[in-house]
Amino acid sequence: MPVVMDAERISRALTRIAHEILEHNRGLANLALVGVRSRGVPIAQRLAADILQITKEQIEVGALDITLYRDDLMGASVGVAPLVRKTEIPFSIDGRTIVLVDDVLYTGRTTRAALDALTDFGRPKSIQLVVLVDRGHRELPIKADYVGKNVPTSRTESVQVHLRELDGVDEVLLQGKE
Amino acid sequence: MDAASASLTALKHKHLLGIADLSPEEIVLILDTAEAMKEVGRRTIKKVPTLRGRTVINLFFEPSTRTRTSFEIAEKRLSADTLNVAIASSSVVKGETLVDTAMNLEAMAPSMIVLRHASSGAGHLLSRICKASIVNAGDGMHEHPTQALLDAFTIRERKHRLAGLKIAIVGDLLHSRVLRSNVLLLTKLGADVWVCAPATLIPPGLEQMGVTVTTRVDEAVEGADVIMMLRIQLERMQGAYFPSQREYFRTFGMTEARVARARPDVIIMHPGPINRGVEIASEVADGASSVILDQVANGVAVRMAVLYLLAGGGDGETARAD
């Protein structure tokens, strides 16, 4: 199974994105990170650690579960209800710049759901998007502001992000579907 | 996928008719999901679009304020379209049978029917003839599963576990569907359950459900982590089960003196509506150990979890690949 990114590559990409976020926003005044569960959350925490190292300032990090906002739950589908986890955003997002963090950008539907979920918590000044991997094939008009790596894929392939915090190892794999 | 997906992520049932049908893993799944739902209730905008476009009918053949309101709020917070059919205003008073009523409602294609009925097994009957998911909101003296789930949720929230806790259930054991559902649930999750009532209000065969039965309330509450009171159903007390309400209170009523026998961090529960001065003293119901109003608040989150899990979802790719 081809490894698209290894641990070092992921770490360097996140450090670069941390710098880009600071450059783009001219510092971290009024900035907060929100990770999309599950893998967006550890990525957001790592970005916060990188930002702390660069600026010696702490940035707030929230966790967003988008399950209740998914568009494939509506209608008369029968099947398994995905596991709902807790959303934890222990700060006000009103008037702030929120940097949304996710692992993979694909159809854009998760991001659409995340935007809906986020705006139920308040009215941010703006929302920016970080993804570790952009694999293309968008179905909605959504674009990431910060990308770890663009990975050209076919629709039959799947991109798997493994992170130390959840999977014990840092790697991004590209898997052909059998 | 991620580590959490190794545990159970779905119910194996289309209906929620009773705790008897649920495995311990399914119960834990409902309680975990309810925790996420509780967070929705703490937001400024207490609404998520999850059940948009689905219709839920609350079909209540018995009076109920708490349970019906709780289900209705849960349905609205999930964006379902809800409507309430109450017995007094329905065609049942014109002689229609339960099955005919249900088949007529079914013709309007609801996704779910929440049913409260005075006859045990009413939910089972509807589950055999309806395409909609049936949620039992209390059937006769049989079960009241969402009450037991919200009780378990409340206990877990305070005690962070259920296994090994001493839980004393005191009150009208004979007529109580809340008791049956609670005993089934708490024993499935490993709690040490004691039940206590006058001998006239103890149903036969209760010992076989894995609980300790006693008529001495002091023994039941001794060292208890949880005291759960059941309502004396005054409307069902025509059979002279005890001499007077005052005597019942003196012998079985939960007073501060009795609560003092339990653990210092005991919590006092009651499914409501409470009869002050019959099964519970006002000082206890309103005291610092009482979680009676927490139970009501948690009821909404638990019912949201049940509705969500029964509604199911597609196996779309968003959670997996994107």
Image (cartoon, rainbow, N blue to C red):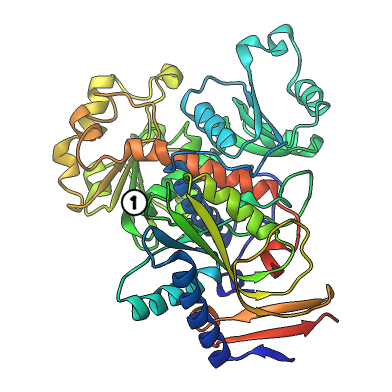
Front residue of this view, candidates B202 and B275: B275
Residue at 57% across, 90% down: A9
**Location of residue B180 in the rendering, given as x and y in whole percent from the top left corner:** 50, 42
Front residue of this view, candidates A145 and A68: A145
Label 1, residues with CA under 10 Å away: few <14, some 14-19, many ≥20: many
Question: Is residue B7 at all visible to an observer of this figure?
Answer: yes
**Location of residue A116 in the rendering, given as x and y in whole percent from the top left corner:** 60, 48
Question: Is residue B205 at all visible to an observer of this figure?
Answer: no
Front residue of this view, candidates A157 and A85: A157
**Location of residue B287 in the rendering, given as x and y in whole percent from the top left corner:** 20, 36
Residue at 23% across, 43% down: B289
Q: Is residue B294 above or below residue A146?
A: above
Q: Label 1: which residue?
A: B167
SS at badge 1: strand
Q: Quadrant of the C terminus of chain A?
A: bottom right
Residue type for callout 1: Ile
Task: Using residue B182 as the reference point, say whether residue B293 is left or right of it.
Answer: left
The chain under label 1 reads: B
In the figure, residue A172 lies in which quadrant? bottom right
Task: Using residue B252 as the reference point, say whether residue A124 is left or right of it.
Answer: right
Q: Is residue B92 above or below residue B200?
A: above
Task: Using residue A74 as the reference point, say whether residue B188 is left or right of it.
Answer: left
